Amino acid sequence: MGYYTAVIYLSCATLLMFARMIHDNQQIDIDTKKRFSVSYLVIIVAMLAEWGGVALNGAPAWTMPLHVLMKAIDYIVTPYLGLRLVEIVMPKSRLLKYLRLLIASNSIAEIISAFNGSIYYVDSQNVYHHGAFYSVYVMVFVSALVSVLWAYLKVLRDSSNTYGRSTISIVLMVAAGIGLQVFFGNEMRTICLAITYGTMLLFVQYQEYYLRKNEIDLSEKQKLLETDVMTGLKSRFAYSNVLDKYENLDKLPDNLTAVVFDVNGLKRINDSLGHKAGDELVQGAGECLKKAFSDYGECYHISGDEFVALLEVDPEYLNEAMVGFNDIVASWRGEHIDSISVSAGYAVAKDNPGNINNLISIADAMMYENKRSYYSKKENCRRKNTG
């Protein structure tokens, strides 16, 4: 009994320290902290109830009611732990509904057994025995254990096969501890120890999963921020980030080319055909850029009718890409409008020493020169047609 008492004491102390560590952990949300802490409290109550039942076994007759109470608490609280552990990883699962019903039914059965001895009873010598329907409790306990295994495997299996294997290993370790006590009885009380270690290992595993999930969520949010909703190209946010990256370089790569684009006639289309047609024009320009330049670098939609492509490409491939872009633009057709026109200008870092902003300014100046030329030619054509 002395060794068993020491095990219970150390297990309770370990769980309390672990609960404190969880409380101090800044990487886990408050609700998850509460669920783990309550689960550890449930384990401590179950262990103390089991210890009390063992300590009172064969004790003076006047302790018999307390002995029965200890066994009732033990048989009610231990399966309840399964519900708490499932709630940690699946707080809104339908499984919880069935587990709550199962645990509530078991609690009622254990309370009744305290009076009629159907599942457990204490004889006139104050010695504990299994009742005729003890197997019902075993089924409840196993159901709770299987539910924990299923819940953790379901949550963790999408992240890594390693999580699934280690979860099974943890549950098998707990099952082995339970089996040893069931087989050897009072000679080997290992259930509390197995559950203590099992829940601690599940927390360590869940914390790793939780941190990895947060990293993935942050990565997905970053991807959303860096993607332009209208065109599917990189966003202005991503454009600002890449400019910062190039600003920090001592020297721009010689083959870095900045290409600036501006959609011609967007305001006229918006005013005459509506914004739906204007949006289609912008989306069309984005499609053309993606088809022409995606193999050479990144394209960014930086404002309504403005785009920038930052390419690290040799001069011969740049000319090839620009010719390809013009061909793609010429063949583009939309639902509301049947053609698109884009003015472009570019600058190569090798020929224009300086920082990234200087390179883009040079490309921008060329684009506006081409844009003026486009509108000048269009105006001359209009005058000839009306003259």
Image (spheres, rainbow, N blue to C red):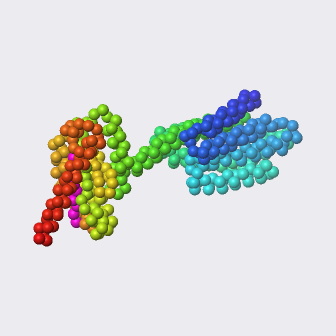
Residue 154's place in the image compared with 176, above or below, is below
- Percent across and percent down for residue 293 are 24, 48
Hey, which quadrant is residue 92 in on the image?
Answer: bottom right
In the image shown, does 256 or 67 lie closer to the viewer?
Answer: 256
Residue shown at the point (27%, 62%) measured from the top left = 266
Residue 170's place in the image compared with 332, above or below, is above
- Percent across and percent down for residue 296 are 24, 44
Q: Is residue 288 left or right of residue 15?
A: left
In the image shown, does 360 or 337 lie closer to the viewer?
Answer: 360
Residue shown at the point (25%, 52%) measured from the top left = 261
Q: Residue furthest top?
A: 3
Q: Residue furthest right?
A: 62
Residue extent of the magenta highlight: 338-346
- Percent across and percent down for residue 356 are 29, 40
Instruction: State the quadrant of the C terminus.
Output: bottom left
Residue 353's place in the image compared with 371, above or below, is above
- Percent across and percent down for residue 246 are 32, 38
Residue shown at the point (33%, 38%) measured from the top left = 247
Q: Is residue 20 visible?
A: yes
Q: Is residue 214 left or right of residue 44?
A: left
Residue shown at the point (28%, 38%) measured from the top left = 355
Q: Residue furthest bottom?
A: 386
Label count reads 0
Q: Is residue 146 visible?
A: no
